[in-house]
Amino acid sequence: MLKRLFDAGVSFLGFLAISPFLALISLLIKLDSKGPVFYRGARVGRFGKIFRIYKFRTMVTGADRIGSSSTPEDDCRITRVGRFLRKFKLDELPQLLNVLEGDMSFVGPRPQVEWAVRLYKENERKLLDVKPGITDHASLKFSNEDEILRGSTDPDKDYMEKIAPEKIKLGLEYANNNSFAGDILIIVRTLGKVLRR
């Protein structure tokens, strides 16, 4: 209950505080390329519930139909403004709405696409017992995920081999040992990493 009250209150106040900045980003996206401001991809949430994630669109329209789910740093689908937004993780800011709506939390394993969840082993489905989040230990460790995948000819395959096993391991550790105090520490570490960028 404490976590939900924190999520709802902070996401509401945070969204109000940065709304002028979000409006500016929205304008830059519209000026840079054709298409919607937001990307609303399907993700798997707690207990396997499907929801639509909010992200600022950083790729050409229809990018998910012409390429992989995983995105290397040098992906040709990324727009000019999108490259800047992804570098500083600004494309994730609209997920405050997902937190406010209750589909996500500030801290939790990152939500996955359906095909990746179907590959979970039985013990890995424990990840679905907690709400997905904007950040977690795996997000901190793999904040350069796009750089790791740079030059890949099969980004989804390389993601599943080079990144997913450790992210799942860290996600399971969180699912089994999470606490409100631990969440606050992860949030502070995440803000510090973003500011250093």
Image (spheres, grey):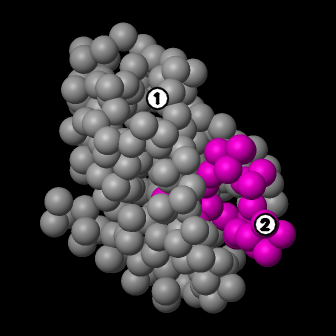
Looking at the rendered structure, the kind of residue marked 2 is Lys
In the image as oriented, which residue stretches furthest toward the front? 153
Labelled disc at residue 38: 1
Q: Does the CB distance between marks 1 and 2 fall below 8 Å?
A: no
Q: Give the side of residue 169 with respect to residue 153, left or right.
A: right
Left or right placement of residue 7 versus residue 57 in this view: right
Q: Give the Cα separation between the discs numbered 1 and 2.
A: 32 Å
Determine which residue is flagged by label 2: 121
- Identify the secondary structure beneath mark 1: strand
| Residue 163 picture location, percent across and down | 48, 62
Q: Does residue 197 show up magenta in the picture?
A: no
For the record, the magenta segment spans: 106-135
Q: Residue furthest top?
A: 34
Residue 64 appears in which quarter of the rendering? top right
- Earlier sequence position, callout 1 versus callout 2: 1
Closer to us: mark 1 or mark 2? Answer: 2
Q: Nearer the viewer, residue 110 or 98?
A: 110
Q: Is residue 95 above or below residue 137?
A: above
- Could you say where residue 73 lies in the image, as x and y percent from the top left? 30, 42
Residue 181 picture location, percent across and down: 49, 88
Which image quarter holds the C terminus?
A: bottom left
Mark 2 residue crowding within 10 angstroms, few (<14) / some (14–19) / many (20+): few
Q: Is residue 119 magenta?
A: yes
> Which residue is at 39% across, 64% downward?
142
